[in-house]
Amino acid sequence: MDKVRSHFYSKVVDELIPDKNASILICGGGELDKNTFLELGFSNVTVSNLDERMHKDSYHPFNWSFENAENLSFEDESFDYT
């Protein structure tokens, strides 16, 4: 992703989620999401996707979950933002 898009993404996330301690679930997430939320100082993030090549350590310090966004295993209201 080019720098203009990643800067836009970072700016929007930063403006829309002011609480850096909020619990966040990212569906279909990847490296850009991990790097963006890490750089912005978020701490309570779960990245989910269906990529079997990825391992939970790939998203450290965040949590990772093998999840289908259309059939999530999390209870309703488990996260402040999804």
Image (spheres, grey):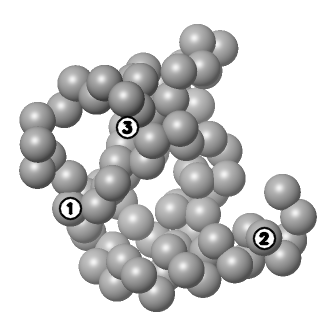
Give the residue displayed 66% in from the left and 45% down from the top. Answer: 31
Q: How many marks?
A: 3
Question: x, y (%) of residue 73?
Answer: 22, 24
The answer to which of marks 1 and 2 sits earlier in the sequence is 2
Residue carrying label 2 = 5
Q: Quadrant location of residue 23?
A: bottom left
The image shows residue 74, relative to residue 12, as above or below, that is: above
* Residue drawn at the location 84% of the way across and 57% of the way down: 1
Report which quarter residue 51 is drawn in.
top right
Q: Is residue 47 something one can see in this rendering? A: yes
Residue 15 located left or right of residue 73: right
Q: Are marks 2 and 3 in contact (CB under 8 Å)?
A: no
In the image, residue 66 above or below residue 23: above
Name the outermost residue toward the front.
Answer: 70
- Type of amino acid at the residue the image marks with label 1: Asp
Q: Amino acid at mark 3?
A: Asn
Find numbered disc 3 in the image and state the secondary structure of the residue it sits on: strand
Q: Is residue 55 left or right of residue 15?
A: right
Q: Would residue 76 appear left or right of 10 to someone viewing this image?
A: left
The image position of residue 43, as x and y in percent, is 35, 60
**Circle 2 SS class:** helix
* Disc 1, SS: loop
| 3 vs 1, front mark | 1
Q: Could you say where residue 50 lies in the image, as x and y percent from the top left? A: 53, 21
For disc 3, the neighbor class at 10 Å (few under 14, some 14 to 19, many from 20) is: some
Which mark is in front, 2 or 3?
A: 2
Pointer 2 or 3: first along the chain: 2
The amino acid type, in three-letter code, at marker 2 is: Arg
> Which disc, if any, is residue 33?
none
**Which residue has dot 1 on it?**
80
Which residue is tagged 3?
63
User: In terms of sequence position, does the residue under pointer 3 or pointer 1 come before the other?
Assistant: 3
